[in-house]
Amino acid sequence: MAADEIRGDEIRGAAQGDAPVPLSVLDLVTVGAGRTASDALRTSVDLARLAEARGFHRYWVAEHHSMPGVASSSPAVILAHLAAHTDRIRLGSGGVMLPNHAPLVIAEQFGTLEAMAPGRVDLGLGRAPGTDGATAAALRRTDRLNEGADDFPEQLAELIRFLDDDFPDGHRYRRIHAVPGPVQATSPGGVQSPHRPPVWLLGSSGFSARLAGVLGLPFAFAHHFSAQNTVPALDLYRESFQPSAVLDRPYALIGVSALAADEEKEARRQVLAAALSMVRLRTGRPGLVPSPEEAAAHEFSPMERDFVDSWNANVIHGTPDEVRSGLDDLAKRTGADELMITANAHGGDVRVRSYELIADAYGLPTPA
């Protein structure tokens, strides 16, 4: 499918209820201590169904590797599972780390997802490894890690060519086709879906912001772990934006960490546990997400306490009204076109409840 056949409504969302912009979900498929990956994946199904029923616009899964507390190493597999349990909500990667994979493989995987869930699949791409250097080397079977990131624009162009099946005559890949894909429509008797997954660029700095703008693609910024760069990156994206066959004007969403609970004290307990998990990850000791009880008993060093305070300053948490106020303020400050909420907690029930409370706070649709 050609890029000019991507409809704007496959990218732009519509705000529901009293929300200032469309609200979406970013799922890291977190695994808490005492829980299994199966438990986490069942929570993902519950969350996707809830998000669909309550009017969240899209549901993305992130690619991470070698992290015991994050079971999202295979986004395409998880998305196929979620597609089988939902009917309408957009599903996508937030994102697939392009340098970890051959572009043809990604085109085949997401062509398959598009065939499973026509017209509701997004392909979000990042250029970071989603892990540490040693794991990235194992994934890519090379120690030349910078090469993959430096070649990102060329890899992206190749991937889009595979998705559109439009390599020019004489190109070494002219006779290679991503299947499922557009080539099926040109085969005798062939009929192909009029859709192909819209490509998004993800970033936590200015590189992908500028590239997305120059190419006229939608952009997703990782505010949840790079808050200080959010406004500069969005400004750069908008300044660099050139209208394309995909978008006539910029469209940017930001990932935001938010957790609502019935009581403010409970929200604080939950985000402290998630912050302890991040402390361990950042100090080379990744593990399962600890329970609030374990976090409460942990003796934080002064350095750890400084990290926790800094980290949680960018996590919008508290009662539903407090979270709504924080999200409203963030949307106003950044001018983001969409907020993609990630709720990290030890228990799946806590995460599900958080999204329920946020939906209620904004008066999002309730199922009949």
Image (cartoon, rainbow, N blue to C red):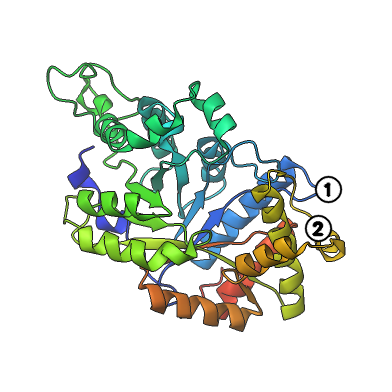
What element does badge 1 sit on? Answer: loop
* In the image, residue 84 above or below residue 269: above
Q: Is residue 1 above or below residue 206?
A: above
Specify whether residue 353 is in view. no
Q: Position of residue 351 (x, y in %)?
A: 67, 62
Quarter of the image that includes the C terminus: bottom right
Q: Which residue is found at the position 35% from the left and 65% from the top?
A: 232
Please, is residue 180 above or below residue 329 in the view?
Answer: above
The crowd level at tag 1 (other Cα within 10 Å; few <14, some 14-19, many 20+) is few
Q: Marks 2/1: CA distance?
A: 9 Å
- Residue beneath the point at 80% across and 63% down: 292
Position of residue 72 measured from the top left corner of the image (x, y, whole percent) = 59, 42
Towards the viewer: 14 or 188: 14
- 292 or 176, which lies in front? 292
Residue at x 41%, y 41% (from the top left corner): 127
Q: Residue 121 got which mark?
A: none
Which numbered tag is attached to residue 291? 2
Q: Is the residue under label 1 in contact with that under label 2 (CB below 8 Å)?
A: yes
Residue of label 1: 34
The three-letter code of the residue at mark 2 reads: Ser
Secondary structure of residue under mark 2: loop
Q: Is residue 42 left or right of residue 203?
A: right
| Amino acid type, callout 1 | Gly
